[in-house]
Image (cartoon, rainbow, N blue to C red):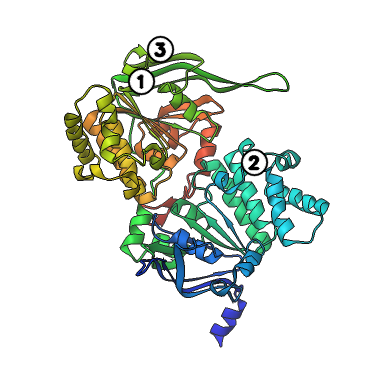
């Protein structure tokens, strides 16, 4: 009797996934998701966590009825949305349910939005398809929703195209589109992965506020346990399509039962810095008074000048990792592109071992000495070329015989933890972490003086991220290469950087030893970045909460 009374006092179950199995459509198809089951109640946030390939996103697509036709299908179990089994729903019924009862926020808002339509009209389309409101009523409702998701100057935003908005603003548009019809269930698939810490915090607060107002049930898919510790009521851990364990947030973070869960939680980097600045290190890179000004041309008036970087100065020593941190738009990547001369600085000097490469016209000789590692390894590798061909390209271009280049490439792959036997394989045959190792090998094989890593681990799972960070440290220790490390993740910077440069609106606001900048920041902006980092009061390595510093 007591159990029945307690159960009736709980909020109603909005989503119930029961023994869900999804497999590939081909004959004898492989199971992608096996016997998954969990409930989500009104006003509750359930975080589904796991590495890439664990089946998180496939589960969310099955709930939305968006499994690719001819590719995947649910061949077992039930998905009850307010008691209705969506696996039995017709395509017409699923179109009625989407946006009205269940909605989804995707990871990359730029690909979720139509680039040739104004964002206001895209939100209006949801109302036009699912309500009987007239045009004036729809616009009024859209403007009110834009206000609710805390966007500024809503009239201008309504008439803007996606490319005219920041990443955080685009994500708010997608959230507005998802919630405008007040669905009972919101599925958020990695909605903050690519955002800087302050924007991420704002988006998480926004989802929580709207959830509390509407009592929306939320399924939040992520690999970031820092985010999980901030928002989760309960956690579902997945690995290779199967459920590993499930429980309350505090139980999973503080007392994980399974080894896989313990590995995931302990892989979250700490905010406590590990390295001090190197004493008397030979200077590899010295940037002095760097400016970068862009001129935006207009057909209807004066050209607009944008100062993306202003009077930026810092150094990178041999065997040193110097990190540049800051929000999107702070000028981090602009500085990196100027350093490697993908764009020419407007003023200032860039000295590479004493040579001012900002003034060099023929960059062919310099390219070998400075190598760049991009954020997305898949897009930076040619899908039509084997791994071996990609790695030896630079060596061959600089005159090394192909046979010798192949031997050197094989040895470098061993250095990054891959076998030389993989050189005849193509990029799509590797995981995301393995592809990033290949990109690192392609850069290191040139024996550069300087490596520039631009958000090189931001798209990786926490476990793979930890492995790649360790790889950077090993390469630094073995080769003595200087590394300029661009990141918006303060936890990553704390684990790998000797020196940290903090940028805001194109200017350096603070720089120094990582232990000083992160442990005792002098500038208010640096303190705001640290405060915005998820879970500053949780020690993931030791599975326990810690008190915030006074």
Given the current orientation, which residue lies at the most extreme bottom position?
A: 1
Q: Quadrant of residue 83?
A: bottom right
Please report the residue visible at 64 percent of the width from the left and 21 percent of the height from the top.
Answer: 297
Mark 2–mark 1 Cα distance, whole angstroms, equals 42 Å
**Residue 297 vertical placement versus 18 (above, below):** above
Task: Determine which of the numbered discs, if any, sits on residue 285 in the image.
Answer: 1
Q: Vertical placement of 313 versus 75: above or below?
A: above
Q: How far across and down, in percent of the image, does residue 412 sit?
A: 22, 36
Q: Upstream in the sequence, badge 2 or badge 3?
A: 2
Image position of 264 (left or right of 95): left
The label on residue 116 is 2
Instruction: Tell me the crowding category of disc 2: few under 14, some 14 to 19, or many 20 or more residues within 10 angstroms, Cα based.
Output: few
Badge 3 local density, few (<14 within 10 Å), some, or many (20+)?
few
- For the question of whether residue 442 can be seen, the reply is yes
- Residue 361 circle label: 3
Which quadrant would residue 479 be assigned to in this image? top left
Q: Secondary structure at mark 2?
A: loop
For residue 303, which numbered disc appears in the image?
Answer: none
- Indicate which label's residue lies in the foreground, 2 or 1: 2
90 to the left or right of 291: right
Residue shown at 37%/13% (left/top)? 362
Residue at the spot x=32%, y=19% of the render?
283
How many residues crowd around disc 1 within 10 Å: few (fewer than 14), some, or many (20 or more)? many
Kindly report the distance in space between the C-alpha atoms of the residues bearing marks 1 and 3. 19 Å
The x, y position of residue 312, in whole percent, is 48, 20
Residue 541 horizontal side relative to residue 219, left or right? left
Q: Residue at x 48, y 29 (%)?
A: 332
Q: Earlier in the sequence, mark 2 or mark 1?
A: 2
Kind of element beneath mark 1: strand
Residue 473 lies, in percent from the top left, at: 28, 37
225 or 365: nearer the viewer: 365
Q: Quadrant of residue 271?
A: top left
């Amino acid at each position: 009797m007591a159990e029945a009374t307690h159960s009736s006092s709980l909020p109603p179950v909005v989503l119930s996934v029961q023994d869900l199995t999804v497999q590939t459509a081909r004959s004898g198809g492989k199971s992608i998701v096996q016997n998954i089951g969990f409930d989500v109640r009104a006003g509750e946030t359930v975080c589904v966590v796991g590495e890439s390939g664990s089946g998180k996103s496939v589960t969310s697509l099955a709930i939305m009825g968006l499994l690719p036709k001819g590719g995947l299908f649910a061949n077992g179990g039930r998905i009850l949305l307010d008691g209705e089994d969506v696996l039995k729903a017709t395509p017409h019924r699923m179109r009625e349910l989407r946006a009205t009862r269940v909605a989804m926020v995707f990871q990359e808002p730029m690909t979720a939005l139509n680039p040739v339509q104004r964002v206001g009209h895209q939100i209006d389309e949801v109302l036009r398809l699912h309500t009987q409101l007239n045009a004036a009523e729809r616009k009024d409702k859209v403007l009110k929703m834009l206000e609710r998701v805390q966007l500024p100057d809503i009239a201008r935003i309504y008439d803007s195209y996606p490319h005219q908005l920041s990443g955080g603003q685009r994500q708010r548009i997608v959230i507005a589109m998802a919630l405008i019809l007040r669905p009972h269930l919101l599925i958020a698939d990695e909605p903050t992965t690519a955002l800087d810490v302050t924007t991420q915090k704002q988006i998480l607060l926004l989802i929580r506020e709207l959830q509390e107002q509407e009592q929306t049930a939320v399924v939040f898919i992520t690999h970031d346990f820092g985010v999980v510790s901030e928002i989760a009521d309960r956690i579902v851990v997945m690995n290779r399509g199967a459920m590993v364990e499930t429980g309350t947030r505090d139980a999973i973070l503080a007392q994980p039962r399974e080894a896989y869960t313990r590995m995931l939680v302990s892989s979250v980097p700490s905010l406590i810095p590990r390295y001090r600045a190197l004493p008397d290190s030979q200077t590899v890179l010295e940037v002095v008074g760097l400016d970068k000004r862009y001129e935006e041309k207009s057909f209807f008036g004066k050209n607009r000048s944008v100062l993306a970087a202003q009077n930026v100065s810092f150094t990178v020593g041999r065997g040193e990792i110097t990190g540049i941190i800051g929000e999107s738009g702070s000028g981090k990547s602009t500085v990196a592109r100027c350093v490697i001369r993908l764009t020419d600085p407007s003023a200032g000097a860039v000295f590479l071992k004493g040579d001012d490469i900002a003034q060099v016209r023929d960059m062919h000789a310099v390219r070998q000495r400075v190598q760049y590692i991009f954020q997305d390894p898949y897009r930076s590798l040619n899908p039509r070329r084997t791994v071996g061909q990609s790695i030896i390209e630079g060596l061959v271009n600089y005159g090394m015989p192909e046979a010798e280049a192949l031997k050197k490439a094989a040895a470098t792959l061993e250095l990054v933890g891959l076998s030389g036997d993989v050189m005849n394989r193509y990029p799509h045959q590797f995981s995301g972490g393995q592809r990033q190792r290949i990109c690192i090998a392609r850069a290191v094989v040139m024996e550069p003086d300087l490596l520039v890593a631009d958000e090189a681990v931001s798209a990786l799972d926490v476990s793979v991220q930890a492995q790649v960070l360790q790889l950077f440290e090993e390469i630094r220790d073995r080769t003595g290469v200087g590394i300029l490390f661009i990141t918006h993740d303060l936890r990553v910077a704390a684990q790998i950087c000797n020196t940290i440069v903090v940028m805001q609106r194109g200017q350096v606001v603070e720089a120094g030893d990582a232990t000083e900048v992160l442990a005792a920041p002098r500038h208010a902006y640096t303190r705001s970045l640290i405060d915005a980092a998820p879970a500053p009061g949780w020690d993931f390595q030791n599975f326990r909460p810690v008190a915030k510093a006074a």
